[in-house]
């Protein structure tokens, strides 16, 4: 994929940088007694308190309390966090290495719909590599729960454009959601829909 004039790359996180394991997460929550977890974390799971948590409208503590209400038995914060974080399946080292290489040529950003429990776990477990941390891979990190916005709303893309002072026509957005990419395209941003856990590094093989 060669697009002339690209200076900026915006990456999604889930299924683009970090691999996901939905089935393991479902199993872990079911073992805690949350029997309707499949519906809660389906492709349209960003509803109700899950959506509010990703949008930063409720805290991690409030999120855990909602989980406890559904389970209706004593469950510790750690048990809930462990089950929720089991959704995340790690970042391949070759992707971390590629991000570092891309920073030498492009302005690289992260724009993710995520929550503080997942992000804190990712920073501790997945981003450390050869002495680097999460902030080393990106010019700036934009997270939905901090911005109080969610993709695919146009406002979150506009907020990134305005804050990073980037030209949409000089920007490539890589996300696993076609809906997110279509909104980005409508704003003049080039986009690429990545398949789950795809090796997107091939897009830059000619760089």
Image: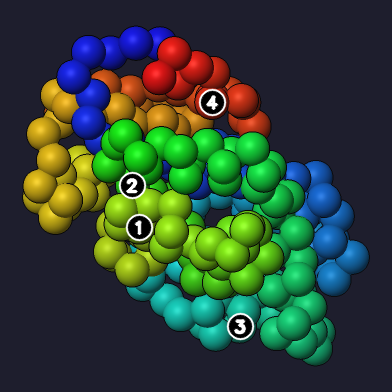
Give the mark toward the camera: 2 or 3. Answer: 2
Nearer-the-camera pick, 64 or 84: 84
Q: Residue at x 55, y 72 (%)?
A: 120
The Cα atoms of the two marked residues, 1 and 3, are separated by 28 Å
Mark 1 vs 3, N-terminal side: 3
Against 203, is 27 above or below?
below
Q: Earlier in the sequence, mark 4 or mark 1?
A: 1
Q: Quadrant of the N terminus?
A: top left
| Residue that carries the numbered disc 3 in the rendered image | 65
- Residue 201 image label: 4
Secondary element under disc 3, as helix, strand or loop, is: helix
Q: Contact, CB < 8 Å: mark 4 with mark 1?
A: no
Tell which circle, 3 or 4, labels the residue nearer the N-terminal end. 3
The image shows residue 154, relative to residue 185, as above or below, that is below
**Image point 89% across, 65% down: which residue?**
31
Question: Hey, which quadrant is residue 84 in on the image?
Answer: bottom right
Residue 35 figure quarter: bottom right
In the image, taking residue 117 as reference, residue 160 lies left or right, namely left
Q: CA distance from mark 2 to mark 4?
A: 15 Å
The residue tagged with tag 1: helix, strand or loop?
A: strand
Identify which residue is drawn at 64% across, 32% down: 197
Disc 2: which residue: 109
Residue 176 higher or lower than 192, as above or below: below
Whether residues under marks 1 and 2 lie with C-beta atoms below 8 angstroms apart, the answer is: yes
Point out the tag, 2 or 4, that comes first from the N-terminus: 2
Count of marks overlaid on the render: 4
Q: CA distance from mark 4 to mark 1?
A: 20 Å
Residue carrying label 1: 141
């Amino acid at each position: 994929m060669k697009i002339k004039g690209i200076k900026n790359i915006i990456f999604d996180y889930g299924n683009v940088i970090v691999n996901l394991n939905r089935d393991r997460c479902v199993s872990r929550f079911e073992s805690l007694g949350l029997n309707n977890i499949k519906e809660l974390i389906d492709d349209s799971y960003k509803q109700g308190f899950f959506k509010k948590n990703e949008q930063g409208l409720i805290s991690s503590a409030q999120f855990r309390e909602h989980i406890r209400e559904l389970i209706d038995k004593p469950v510790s914060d750690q048990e809930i966090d462990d089950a929720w974080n089991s959704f995340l399946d790690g970042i391949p080292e070759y992707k971390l290495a590629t991000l570092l290489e891309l920073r030498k040529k492009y302005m690289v950003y992260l724009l993710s719909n995520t929550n503080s429990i997942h992000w804190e776990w990712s920073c501790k477990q997945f981003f450390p590599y050869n002495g680097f941390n999460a902030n080393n891979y990106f010019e700036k990190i934009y997270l939905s729960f901090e911005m109080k916005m969610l993709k695919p709303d146009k406002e979150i893309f506009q907020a990134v454009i305005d804050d990073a002072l980037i030209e949409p026509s000089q920007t490539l957005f890589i996300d696993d959601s076609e809906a997110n990419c279509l909104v980005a395209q409508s704003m003049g941003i080039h986009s690429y829909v990545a398949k789950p856990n795809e090796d997107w590094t091939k897009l830059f093989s000619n760089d």
